[in-house]
Image (cartoon, rainbow, N blue to C red):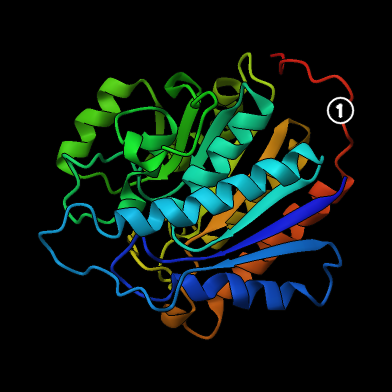
Amino acid sequence: MRTMIFGAGSDLGVHIDGASLGPVQLMNDLASFYQGETMMFEQDKSIIKSRNLSDRRKNEYEVEKFNTQLYKSIVEKTKEEYFPILIGGDHSLAVASALASAKVNNDVGIIWIDAHTDYNTFETTVTGNLHGLPLAAITGYKCSEMRFYHDGKIIQPSRCVVIGARSIDEAEKDNVRYSGITVFSTEDVREKGIEAVMDEAFKIAGYKTKGVHVSYDLDVIDPDVAPGVSIPEFDGITEEEAMEINAYLVNHFDKIVSFDLVEFNPLRDQERKTEQIALNILAQIIRAAENKKKIETPNYIQY
């Protein structure tokens, strides 16, 4: 299958700089073996990011403008039967990629691999960083301001699974509790094992859907192993567990319709540790996407 890599060089969703540089660096690295097509989007360098601690809507207009362009491009290329791979940038970009997948594929689930649930709203966010709101926006839990450009179905919360969460704001916990999404913590991953958690995740996200959007945030990995992220959270999964998750994704790629890798921040990396892990993940995903067979008549995933 033809692949299209979308580089999304934006860190407008977080007050810390650096994630905007990740896509360029990773796409340059990929050039040594990836011969497919790419599209690059970069934030306007004239933008002065809001860093005001009292601002609960940091760079809202700029994020919406960036995501509108990204969303339209992903929708267009997906309709042309490319498999879309998004390289971010901060996680607010996934509103565009996930909803673009929902627009084209109509009924999709989502697996969100992340140290955070990203289920804040404008009312509950502590920092005002919009990369803490995308999953709520994608699943229709308030945050409509982050999806004005989307005129298709949202992704149903009951078809949403978070894997690896270990940092949830106090007010955000109620959002998660009332939403109907499923959350597997880092502790759950350790107790149940990768295979059991991933099996359950695909059963939930794939139930009566036509595919699954996967959004992989590198901060799910412990920062001692992968320090190159903007908001590190300790006690994360190991590199081996991260690659085991990826191996599971590759082995079930017939059920995946789109993929994100986000939050690589080269300014915070050490000895290129995070960069190498990101490249290993992407290399496996790209090969799986290129080997993915086109489904002539999409049917609901059956379990």
Whether residue 274 appears in this view of the structure is no
Q: Nearer the viewer, residue 63 or 185?
A: 63
- Picture layout, residue 13 above or below residue 244: below
Across and down, in percent, residue 74 comes to 65, 47
Across and down, in percent, residue 116 comes to 35, 48
Left or right of residue 271: residue 144: left
Q: Which residue is drawn at the image coordinates 39% and 43% (left, top)?
A: 134
Across and down, in percent, residue 3 comes to 80, 52
Q: Nearer the viewer, residue 129 or 174?
A: 129
- Picture layout, residue 34 above or below residue 221: below
Tag 1: amino acid: Ile
Name the secondary structure under disc 1: loop
Q: Which residue is drawn at the image coordinates 23% and 68% (left, top)?
A: 50
Q: Quadrant of the C terminus?
A: top right
Across and down, in percent, residue 254 comes to 78, 33
Q: Residues within 10 Å of mark 1 (few under 14, many from 20)?
A: few
Q: Which residue is drawn at the image coordinates 48% and 71% (left, top)?
A: 20
- Picture layout, residue 47 above or below residue 175: below
Locate residue 181: give its quadrant.
top left
Locate residue 169: give its quadrant.
top left
Label total for image: 1
Q: Which residue is drawn at the image coordinates 31% and 36% (left, top)?
A: 143
Q: Quadrant of the N terminus?
A: top right
Q: Which residue is mark 1?
A: 295
Locate residue 157: give its quadrant.
top left
Q: Nearer the viewer, residue 214 or 166?
A: 214
Residue at the far bottom in the pictured view: 271
